[in-house]
Image (cartoon, rainbow, N blue to C red):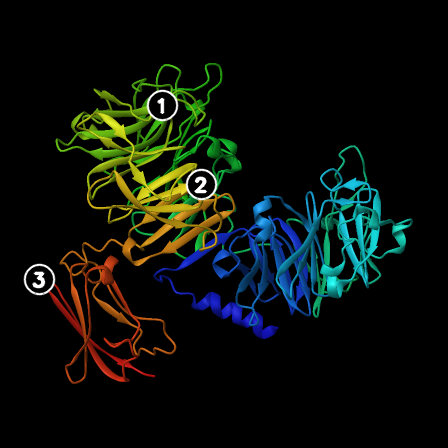
Amino acid sequence: MKFYALLILCFLLSCPAIAAGDWRTFSHPFPVRGAVAHGDGVLLATDGGIRYRTMDGDFVFHSEDGLETSSFYAVAKSSLGVFAVSEYGLIATMTGDGSSWRVVNRSYLTNNVRVRPDIVTLAGSILVIAFDDRLAFFDLVRSVSVLTIEKIADRSMSISPVDKLVARGDSLYVRMGDKAYVRKMNWKDLGADYQLSNPESWSLVKDMSKVSGLPAPDLSKIEVDGDTLGFDFLFEKKDPDSDKMTSRIKWIVKIPRGYFLISDEMIIFYNGKPKEKGYVNVSDFATYMLGETYEISALPVGGAIAASPQGGLSYCNGNQWRETTYPLEKRGSYSSAYSVRMKMLSSTPDGHVFFHIWGHGYFIYSNWGERLEHSFLATDDLCFDSFLSETPYVVSTASAPAPDGSGFLTVASSTDGYTVVYFTNDGDVHCAKNIGSSSLAGPMIARTAEDGSWRLYIGSRDGAAIQADGGLDEIRFPSPKSNGGELSDGTVKLYRGLNTTLVDMVYDTVANRLWVASMANLAYLDEELDTLMTPTSVKGLRGADYTSLDVDVHGNLWVGTANQGAYRLSLKGKSPDTLSVEHFTARMGLLSDDVSDISVDAVLGAVWFSHGKGVSRYFRNDLKYAEKNMTDSSSADVVAYPVPFRPMVHDHFTIDHIAEDAVVSIFNRGGALIRSFSGNDILGGRLEWNGLGKDDKLVAPGVYYYVVRTSSKTKKGKFLIIH
């Protein structure tokens, strides 16, 4: 298994920075729900995936690794293999090389009932799973559910859930509260046991203490191989009125080098020598530390910054995350971040980031959130309003970069109509007091109009709840640079159509069209009719709870939902009334189907998704901004890789940074045309060739040439193909 740890480490080090069609997810793998020894380390079922921890390596398997979801409540192991059970009963098994997983059963998911954390057992080929209201028996060899039962003796599991399962020989013991029951099981042919569904076929266990592992554990001490451990940090005082200390440790897992002592939030390696300080805290997961997120924003230079409800910010350049500061001593927006669907993260190309903590104030950071430059607190007596009359308490739900990049705009809620606030990067604050049509405001977009004025679209809200009535305000201001730096003389225009609170909006610069989303509807602004219009046909999209909205460089809408993953909506023709739908779920690579925010990264060619459990990232060729490719203003020349190209080793030969209107031709050494590509083949400015010729057969090894030609430029190069 040392090779296995080395394999994982090599995978982490060799992971490409950018790959087309590539899913990757990031999570904080806690709390721990179950643990089992595996090789030189321990496999942990967590809310953020299946974590494999050794003393030398650390890796987390997610949905993109074949798990199809990332919240797991149990992990078990036998001669048949390693099996993981998700929060709602999906069963997956680890592949033979340990690099991925394969789902073997999804049937329990339809019940929408949670698994009891770590309450599973393996007996022969049968996996027994305790749910909140039933006990399920699954045959791992035949990959079928044998039976589920909801009652044992006179006790219903929906009233008295299972606390412990123990398989001993041909007997299964089940503890339910203060009682335990036992039954003889025909593990080799459980389907032939017709009495298994009979509650009366179970017997009461008279003395639980005689069955190893069945009684509730003694939490007053921690014993490892007969030695009692006294390390203080392994204990906690649960009752403030008592001096009694209780063990934090739930799992003691033996591995060849020692032991892992594991609690919900802590992983300790112990060398087995009680007289030494032979322990190491290996809890931290360095790849991603932010934990849950409610908002994510793609940055103007590529990458993303994410915000947690606890007030933390974290920056990612595409693959690697860097945790930044926590404002106000880790005070955050907490439940308000989700309940009002805040869209507060904004950034400018020079590295400034704007952020708001519900009730407390506003913050401007530099270096992508690493250094706090300015704070504007509710107690500072500035021009923005307090939402509460007696207590300084500032409330905003959205922000946007100023159209000229000089700072940021937001809306401060007030009972007299919301106030538009302009913060400069230098720390100046300007307010257009009580200009809004409602007390609260939702998402916002800020653009420069043709006459140089600032044009703001702001969602109005008649209440904090996202089910409240609302609409769309359009507010125009003279540019502050032409107005003495002030934000004043604004004019307001109201649009209706949806008559409900908006949760997000985006401006499509391809079609010059504003799109908005409420909790239940999508709409676009028809300025000729002065109203918001709902598309007439969006087949494949219904019953969604919308959370977020963005648009890519080709005018396709990306929509996040609270219950159905994400969607890509494309116009059929030029009309916004008919949209085609592409659906993305956890089964395809999302960390979770609960998407709290979505943001398109046109620099890296990716979509970022935030979830309550972490972040997902999806690379895709047609998402990348390619208008400057092969122009005099381009910062990158045409490149081709890998050289040499080994079709049996590499998935593709890539030609990157090409213009989307180019024609790419590949010739052999004799000058014969092998393949030609254009249009959809090179969306996003990248061609990926699999080495097949016109006859769909692998071309011969040797020297080849590529020619990339536009109406004004030509780029050439040669490369070697080796079989």
Q: Where is residue 264 in the image (x, y as percent from the top left)?
A: 66, 49
Q: Nearer the viewer, residue 579 or 432?
A: 579
Q: Quadrant of the C terminus?
A: bottom left
On screen, 433 above or below 14? above
Q: What element carries label 1?
A: strand
Say which label, 2 or 1, has the lower sequence index: 1
Residue where numbered disc 3 is placed: 711
Residue where numbered disc 2 is placed: 596
Relative placement, left or right, of 427 versus 121 is left
Measure how far apart labels 3 and 2 are at the Cα level.
Answer: 43 Å
Q: Position of residue 86 (x, y in %)?
A: 59, 52
Q: Quadrant of the N terminus?
A: bottom right
Extreme-left residue of the structure:
712
Q: Is mark 3 on a helix, strand or loop?
A: loop
Q: Which mark is residue 470?
A: 1
Please say whether residue 303 is visible from this viewpoint: no
| Label tally | 3
Identify the residue shown where x is 32% and y is 83%. Answer: 722
Measure how far apart labels 3 and 1 are at the Cα level.
Answer: 49 Å
Q: How crowded is mark 3: few (under 14 residues within 10 Å), some or many (20 or more)?
A: few
Say which label, 3 or 2, has the lower sequence index: 2
Q: Residue 388 carries which label?
A: none
Extreme-right residue of the structure:
206
Measure how far apart labels 2 and 1 are at the Cα level.
Answer: 21 Å
Say which label, 3 or 1, has the lower sequence index: 1
Residue type for callout 2: Ser
Residue type for callout 3: Ser
